Image (spheres, grey):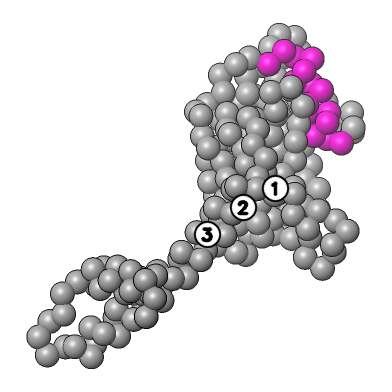
Amino acid sequence: MNARDLELTLAAARAVGPCPPGEEAAWTEQVRAKAVTLYTLADTVGQDLGRLDAAKQFTATLLSVRVEATSTRGVLVLRNTSGELEHLRTDRGDSDAGRAMIDRARNLVGHRLRVYRLNEQMAGNNARQVRTVVHLTDHGPDTDPIHENAAKENVLAAAEGDKDAARRAWQDAELPDTGSVSVRQLATALSHLPAADGAQP
């Protein structure tokens, strides 16, 4: 037995607790199962940490989260410190990691975040890459006002240049014609834009 296996077995035994008298066989099976669980957990955590090590980091404010109907990935729209929009995707929503990231992101709309991003190859298409978010560190609500011109440019960019859709979204969100807007108001305007690819909020 190598040192790693011994440490893993001891950790599993501590997690299971003392062996009741006369239940050695059942206790041994519980320790074995716990050791396997700890091993697979360590493997998963190792992969996650490897992705974090390779990720690019930047600060941005989260404005919108939608889920693509075709891929089940979450699509995050973020406003970086230069005032430009960036689109990132989560892992697939039918995976535990993807579903957890989508749920977490929905609770962080309007917050300033430290974003960890990877460019990953698409499954079945090595020529294409997906800009994938692998972690979000929350720095609290973004309370900085946004100049109306910059906000309108963001809405137009999110509408992919569709001026009519951008104007309707601005009006539906009841944003002022002049004066700065809050991050929350800008996020509301983006929520009124038509969804692409059957995406759902």
- Label 1, secondary structure: give it: strand
Give the CA separation, mark 2 to mark 3.
9 Å
- Residue 127 in percent (x, y) is at 88, 58
Could you tell me which residue is drawn at 47 percent across and 70 percent down?
A: 40
**Residue to which mark 2 is pinned:** 51
- Residue 65 vs residue 177, the one in the foreground: 65
Residue 13 is situated, as x and y percent measured from the top left of the image, at 25, 73
**Mark before the other along the chain sequence, 2 or 1:** 2
Q: Position of residue 47 (x, y in %)?
A: 57, 60
The magenta segment is 146-160
Determine whether 199 is above or below 63 in the image. below
Q: Amino acid at mark 1?
A: Leu
Is residue 198 visible in this depiction of the protein? no
Quick one: label 1, few (<14), some, or many (20+) residues within 10 Å?
many
Residue at figure coordinates x 72%, y 13% from the top left: 147
* Residue 125 included in the magenta stretch of the image: no
What crowding class fits label 2: few (fewer than 14 Cα within 10 Å), some (14-19), or many (20 or more)?
some
Under mark 2, the amino acid is Arg
Q: Is residue 155 magenta?
A: yes
Q: In what quadrant of the picture does the N terminus appear?
A: bottom left
* Residue contact at pointers 2 and 1, CB within 8 angstroms: yes
Query: Which of the 4 image quadrants contains residue 154?
Result: top right
Residue displayed at 29% across by 78% down: 31
Q: Quadrant of residue 157?
A: top right
Q: Is residue 102 left or right of residue 16?
A: right
Q: Between 193 and 31, which is closer to the camera in this rendering?
A: 31
Label 3 belongs to which residue? 46
Q: Tag 2, which secondary structure? A: helix
Q: CA distance from mark 2 to mark 1?
A: 7 Å
- Residue on which disc 1 sits: 118
In this image, 111 relative to 201: left or right?
left
